[in-house]
Amino acid sequence: MNPYRMRLPDVGEGVAEAELVQWFVVVGDEVTSESVLAEVLTDKATIEVASPVAGVVTALHGEPGDVLAVGSEFVEIDTGSADSNEPPPTSAAQADVDATTVANQVRQVTRAVDPSIPTSAQTTMEALMARTMAADRYRALLTSGFAAASIVLAAVGIFGVTLRVVQRRRREFGVRLALGARPAGLLAGSLMRTAAGAGAGLLLGLALSALLMPALSPYLHDLSTRDASTYAAAALLLFVISLAAAALPARRATRLNVVEVLREE
């Protein structure tokens, strides 16, 4: 038996090592080319490492939690071939025409050179990248969905609470109008009071977000957890919703009949 000795491949630009998160295979498992062998964690992302050959796993180098250097021995696979230290031959072609046309031409040329070379496993670079990034894309979509749901729930909660608080001041507005207060002044005062409370809550929320966001850094590619525009957009949205929730009932209250408001219990 002359196993194919796979080394930990390059898992990212500038990445020299990776932490082994988990194995998806055990010794004795049969794998195919592109079967996922393990999951590793770098300082940039969580990456699934696939097998470049088909065969039977004969050895695993490393335990979950170990930090492995790029290029170190990773997995040994018995391919059943006398010359198994090299992966099956692969080729790449770049062209400006349709991928199907290129695939047919490559297949014809390969068969003309050596009919024994398999040509069935052909794919495009887009499809290969899609398979490689599928797990990260799923996590990104899932995280984005939770973030959107959080924004919606926060907006609904803030709107409801603010609306209720201002509505409970309806009698107060009536008394102040009866004493000669101007409607514009009441509206401005209500908005300022709401803005102060919303501003304090947003500052606290931004501080907590800045502390907790680094936990998501492994799933962010070329994005910063300190992106000021993202924080500003979310804060501005919630602040505007708070002011709108305060303005609607306050403006309605300033237009009510003062006598009817004072008669209410």
Image: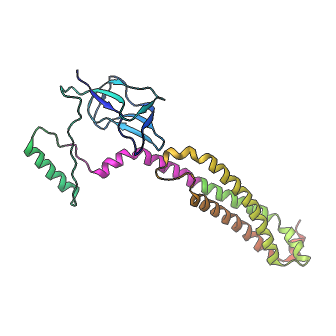
Left/right placement of residue 60 relative to residue 176 reads left
Quadrant in the picture for residue 229: bottom right
- Examine the rendered structure and indicate whether residue 163 appears above or below residue 135: below
**Location of the C terminus (image quadrant):** bottom right
Quadrant in the picture for residue 252: bottom right
Q: How many marks overall?
A: 0
Viewer-proximal residue among 100 and 251: 100
Quadrant in the picture for residue 157: bottom right
Main SS of the magenta part reads: helix
Which residue is situated farthest in the right direction here? 179
- Examine the rendered structure and indicate whether residue 81 appears above or below residue 116: above
Which residue is situated farthest in the left direction here? 112
Q: Is residue 132 magenta?
A: yes
Left/right placement of residue 160 relative to residue 237 reads right
- Examine the rendered structure and indicate whether residue 60 appears above or below residue 236: above
How far across and down, in percent of the image, does residue 46 sit?
Answer: 45, 41
Viewer-proximal residue among 178 and 28: 28
Residue numbers of the magenta segment: 120-149
- Examine the rendered structure and indicate whether residue 79 appears above or below residue 88: above
Q: Is residue 107 magenta?
A: no
How far across and down, in percent of the image, does residue 230 sit?
Answer: 57, 58
